[in-house]
Image (cartoon, helix red, strand yellow):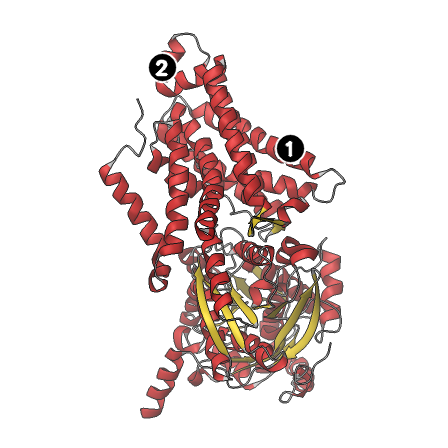
């Protein structure tokens, strides 16, 4: 029983982060058909913002807010400076641009900060564990679940209850038609990038909170996770991204836990084989778009 | 904190400082006849990576190498010639590293500094070997880095993982009396895999018992299953110590997770722990009871020449040297300079011979390479460092005895003998 609860909490905390990462990626993809390969670097930027603020007397929550704002600003800025000028050209141009942006950010961190790991300050809560019903839980994991689920609820409300949300959903469904109906493209795209950056910032707090450090290449894993989760969940659907995130976490933790010790070296092969298998039967992902 | 048997760098084999001084004099006298050769600089080429995944390991070494060039030139260079050092970014791509080395050699490089890894450094060493030049990797600890795989003029400044793992095993078993170990191995790269392999071999050879070896992969981001397994296994059979072979950033995550779960066994590891990034990430709360084997200790008094190095580092760089990987770069250039001085030439074969025949003693302790026929196996002193309350203490130098040889070398030596 205890092990089952442990397993569920592990999956839920990892899955919540995966879901947020995937959502941030698929939001932009839905509108522009662009897989933003610079997405992981937004997480890196949030991390370095925390590092640069680590000597300051600010309370942690303020630092965290700054980090999220930095990721959001970087996301909006890359859209304005890098993606918008090539948007009308071709999808390939945008894709290459996203690689360029990613490399630029990484190298800037290498040059101006350091190639080696740097401290990300954490609140004391992140270094604590609590015992509930005789079981030990990490406060960080529980917080990740609570914050992620609140984000998902907030985000759903935004999409369903506000004009902006309706515009976003319409743009994701049929961008050209949405523009013809008078919705300003730049606004919708700008908002999508802003939300994507915001989610990356939130993810960064918990993702980097595991190691308490940030490095220039730190964005690669979240990017891959987000990409696989969206492909798995269905790239045409926002719900799919969330489902994909949780399913990927379930597979990761499940394989890690139940694979016999002799095969444990190959667990990533198992995870990705499973992903391929699912895609064979459901090429559009688990959740089909309209 | 001084322990017996650890401070042994002063009683190694004959030291060559005196010999070097004598030869320096001789070179000064004999130099008159070769005024032509003395008029240009000795060109050292570097193919270290400043970008990509290899950058965290190569950037500190590059710093150290540059400082050493500066220091050596300030005291008059080598054989009356100043050193010139140019590094081309290898971009963490083995092909680029090889091309860079070839380009530097074409432009006249006489010695090559190779990246701190067998896969990334090997291509540079192979180019050096092809051109008949000495190549030294700053800190590749793969037991493959030597004369058998790369050629008779190729060396690595680091101890091999055989010795690093061996030193960690001896410290745990002999010094501390920890008899049973629980091992966690990051299987993402060869370094972490082979370090665990040789720790386990030596730990068992000297009488220890490894109760379990679990696997993790850098970048997986999730240690929960390993933790659950660890708690289960440790409940069945307690262990005295952890050996965790991984590197930043996930090394920080693994140790934090274990400590957060309330498991406070001591942790032993290798040179990837030598990183202030790790100490910061663990902080005072989790940075306790951790011991690791590495290249040196960046504080006055730990090794000859450390004061000079630290003073120069302070002049040139705004921050402190954060890791002994800086010292490996410094030592590569110092050893190159000393070997060229003794050989009286930069000719690869002559310099390699000097490197095989002498014991060198700089910031990373004393270094004695075996002959090319026996693999250029480094016999090097290993620095032991302790982390308590997030602060490091230098425990001293050690030299593990009878560490296991890598399989390929055993076979190679057997073949040599039977021929």
Q: Can residue A197 be seen in this view?
A: no
Where does label 1 land, which residue? A65
Q: In this view, does B9 lie above or below B286?
A: below
**Nearer the observer, A62 or B47:** A62
Q: Provide the residue designation for mark 2.
A: A176
For residue B39, which quarter of the picture?
A: bottom right
Q: Is residue B372 left or right of residue B72?
A: left
Q: Are the numbered discs 1 and 2 placed on the same chain, yes or no?
A: yes
User: For the residue carrying disc 1, how many other residues have a C-alpha within 10 Å: few (<14), some (14-19), or many (20+)?
Assistant: some
Could you tell which of marks 1 and 2 lies nearer the N-terminus? Answer: 1
Q: Residue at x 38, y 24 (%)?
A: A89
Q: Foreground residue, A171 or A256?
A: A256
Query: Residue A45: x percent and y percent?
Result: 58, 39
Of marks 1 and 2, the one in the foreground = 1
Disc 2 is placed on an element classified as: helix
Label 2 CA crowd tier, 10 Å (few <14, some 14–19, many 20+):
some
- Cβ–Cβ under 8 Å for marks 1 and 2: no
Q: Is residue A76 above or below residue A136?
A: above
In this view, the residue in front, B352 or B14, is B14
């Amino acid at each position: 029983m205890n092990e089952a609860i442990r397993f569920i909490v592990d999956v839920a905390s990892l899955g919540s982060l995966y879901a947020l990462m995937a959502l941030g990626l698929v939001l932009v993809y839905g509108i522009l058909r662009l897989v933003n390969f610079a997405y992981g670097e937004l997480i890196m930027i949030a991390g370095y913002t925390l590092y640069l603020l680590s000597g300051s007397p600010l309370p942690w929550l303020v630092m965290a807010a700054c980090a999220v704002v930095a990721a959001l600003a970087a996301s909006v800025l890359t859209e304005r400076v890098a993606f918008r000028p090539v948007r009308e050209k071709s999808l390939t141009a945008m894709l290459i641009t996203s690689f360029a942006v990613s490399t630029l950010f990484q190298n800037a961190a290498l040059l101006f900060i350091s190639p080696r790991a740097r401290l990300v300050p954490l609140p004391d809560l992140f270094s604590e564990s609590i015992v509930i019903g005789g079981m030990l839980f990490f406060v960080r994991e529980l917080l990740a679940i609570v914050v992620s689920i609140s984000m998902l609820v907030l985000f759903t409300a935004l999409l369903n209850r506000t004009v902006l949300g309706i515009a976003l959903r319409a743009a994701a469904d049929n961008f050209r038609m949405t523009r013809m109906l008078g919705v300003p493209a730049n606004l919708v795209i700008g908002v999508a990038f802003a939300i994507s950056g915001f989610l990356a910032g939130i993810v960064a707090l918990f993702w980097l909170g595991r190691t308490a450090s940030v490095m220039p290449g730190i964005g690669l894993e979240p990017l891959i996770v987000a990409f696989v989760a969206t492909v798995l969940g269905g790239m045409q659907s926002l719900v799919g991204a969330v489902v994909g995130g949780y399913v990927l976490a379930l597979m990761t933790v499940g394989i890690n836990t139940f694979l016999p010790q002799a095969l444990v070296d190959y667990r990533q092969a198992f995870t990705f084989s499973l992903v391929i298998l699912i895609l064979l039967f459901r090429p559009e992902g688990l959740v089909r778009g309209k | 904190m001084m322990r017996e048997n650890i401070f042994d760098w002063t009683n190694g084999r004959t030291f060559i400082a005196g010999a070097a001084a004598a030869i320096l004099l001789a070179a000064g006298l004999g130099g008159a006849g070769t005024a032509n050769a003395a008029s240009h600089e000795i060109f050292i080429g570097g193919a270290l990576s400043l970008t990509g995944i290899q950058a965290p390991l190569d950037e500190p070494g590059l710093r150290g190498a540059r400082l050493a060039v500066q220091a050596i030139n300030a005291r008059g260079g080598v054989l009356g010639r100043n050193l010139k050092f140019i590094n081309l970014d290898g971009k963490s791509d083995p092909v680029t590293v090889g091309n860079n080395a070839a380009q530097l050699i074409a432009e006249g490089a006489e010695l090559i500094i190779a990246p701190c890894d067998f896969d990334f450094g090997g291509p540079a060493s192979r180019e050096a070997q092809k051109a008949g030049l000495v190549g030294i990797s700053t800190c590749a600890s793969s037991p493959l880095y030597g004369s058998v795989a790369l050629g008779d003029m190729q060396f690595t400044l680091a101890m091999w993982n055989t010795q690093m793992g061996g030193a960690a095993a001896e410290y745990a078993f002999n010094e501390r009396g920890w008899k049973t170990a629980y091992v966690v191995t990051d299987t993402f790269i060869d370094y972490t895999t082979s370090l665990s392999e040789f720790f386990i071999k030596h730990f068992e050879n000297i009488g220890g018992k490894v109760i379990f070896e679990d696997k993790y992969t850098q970048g997986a981001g999730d240690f929960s299953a390993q933790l659950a397994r660890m708690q289960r296994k440790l409940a069945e059979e307690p262990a005295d110590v952890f050996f965790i072979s991984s590197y930043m950033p996930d090394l920080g995550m693994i140790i934090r997770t274990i400590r957060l779960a309330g498991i406070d066994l001591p942790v032993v590891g290798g040179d990837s722990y030598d990183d202030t990034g790790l100490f910061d990430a663990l902080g005072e709360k989790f940075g306790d009871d951790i011991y690791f084997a590495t290249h040196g200790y960046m504080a006055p008094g730990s090794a000859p020449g450390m004061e000079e190095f630290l003073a120069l580092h302070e002049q040139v760089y705004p921050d402190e040297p954060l890791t002994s990987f800086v010292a490996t770069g410094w030592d590569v250039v110092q050893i190159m300079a000393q070997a060229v001085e003794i050989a009286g030439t930069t000719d690869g074969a002559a310099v390699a011979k000097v490197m095989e025949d002498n014991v060198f003693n700089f910031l990373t302790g004393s270094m004695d390479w075996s002959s090319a026929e026996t693999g250029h196996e480094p016999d090097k002193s290993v620095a032991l460092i302790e982390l308590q309350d997030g602060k490091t203490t230098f425990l001293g130098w050690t030299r593990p005895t009878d560490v296991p040889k890598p399989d390929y070398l055993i076979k190679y030596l057997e073949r040599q003998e039977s021929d």
